Amino acid sequence: MEQSERKKLKEGLELFLNEGLERLTLSHPADPSGCSRSRIRPLLLKGELVFQAEEQVGRQAFHRNMTKEQAVSYICEMLDGTLRQAEMSGVWGTGVVLVSKKGKVTVKLRRKAARENMAEEANTAKIRPKFQEASALLEHNRRKRYILEEGRPVPFLIDLGVMTAEGKIIRSRYDKYRQINRFLEFIEDILPHLNASRESVILDFGCGKSYLTFAMYYYLRELKGYPVRIIGLDLKEEVICRCSALAETYGYDRLSFFCGDIASYEGVNQVDMVVTLHACDLATDYALEKAVGWGAKVILSVPCCQHELNRQINNPLMSPIMGYGLIKERMAALYTDAIRAQVLEYEGYRTQILEFIDMEHTPKNILIRAVRQDKKGSCENSRKKMGEQLRSLLAFLNAEPAIVRLLAPELILKEPPIDALS
């Protein structure tokens, strides 16, 4: 990118990279195997304005927080060979940046007439919004982005202690409010895979107090009008009784709760979507087995307490690092979820591992999202190759995870690998 074009791009970014930014998306990758998209949004962290980029690389999402200067440099670098298009919108107007294959940059800006003079002044540093005004504007934009808006009373959030009767979020429950909205963003992404013309059955294993179960029902039926039947399942009878009473109070006639175990549940014959959040250890594997057996179109799973592989992994080559209990525990948990995702791919799902909510709020922040494809894998050869890779990995770890025993037992070696015996 030439200096004159970089200067023009920086001048355009100066208009948008502030508290008034609504959306900035970088897309159209030059190399499909690298970063395919980056979304940038403003955040207030400890009273300071920063810009968070969410990069999508394959099935993974990576986050980074930057100052304004760092964000400008980041965007210029991303548009200098990695991505070829940027779309921006904010209180000042809209903008598009296009980069040709030869590297020529085209910047198109459209300002909102009522804001034009203010934009000029802000851009030339004649005035700067006061910090209090910036904070208020950012708070407004942040609230507007949430699916369940603050200020709009939602009955189940009030009864579950997240919101006041006036629609104000209770300060001590704000993390839960963020978690609920983040979960609904995942639901929003899979809407194209749910049938809007017939009733879809959704099963929530290990629903607990059902914050997310109620949120899912409210969003799909009340806000989006989708004909869904949602079933919550948990082992705690007192929790099920309370949730059932609340559902009846709200008139949620297609939301029901039952006591039951994931592995033995036989209440339905066909399920369109399976949700399993924080199901402990092997309970996640049994839930995934059920989901695949039903041919569920969508699976959303946040695993918890992955102990099995921690007990099984046994490879002399890894002993120098596996001798540290904490390291082994974390590596075993990551191996467990990666193998679960790969087995789902092997069974014909397009699978992603995503960040559920920020690590600072909970260490259980991995969400496995799987969408069933019309055909198992791209072809039989690719499925066979995937199976061989999984078999080699299991041999290397000398492990037989439950998800493999349940869904793909043919991948387990009949005899332990030679290295593991030495």
Image (cartoon, grey):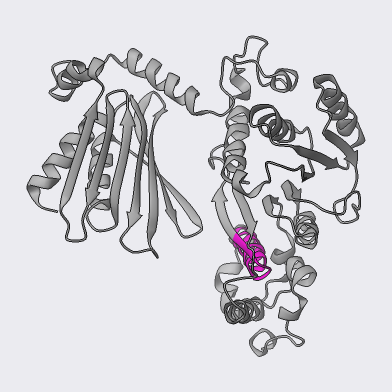
- Relative placement, left or right, of 333 versus 269 is left
| Residue under the point 23% across and 18% down | 113
- Relative placement, left or right, of 18 versus 211 is left
| Residue under the point 30% across and 61% down | 30
- Relative placement, left or right, of 170 versus 289 is left
Bounds of the magenta segment: 330-350
Where residue 67 appears, x then y in whole percent?
Answer: 29, 36
Please tell me which residue lies in front, 115 or 309.
115
Q: How many marks?
A: 0
Q: Residue 339 colored magenta?
A: yes
Examine the residues drawn in magenta and state their main secondary structure.
Answer: helix
Where residue 135 appears, x then y in whole percent?
Answer: 38, 18
Residue 391 visible in the displayed image? yes
- Relative placement, left or right, of 242 versus 215 is right
Quadrant assignment for the N terminus: bottom left
| Residue under the point 61% across and 43% down | 191
| Residue under the point 23% across and 30% down | 110
Residue 230 against residue 100 in the figure, above or below: above
Where residue 411 appears, x then y in whole percent?
Answer: 71, 79
Please tell me which residue lies in front, 196 or 271.
196
Residue 17 visible in the displayed image? no
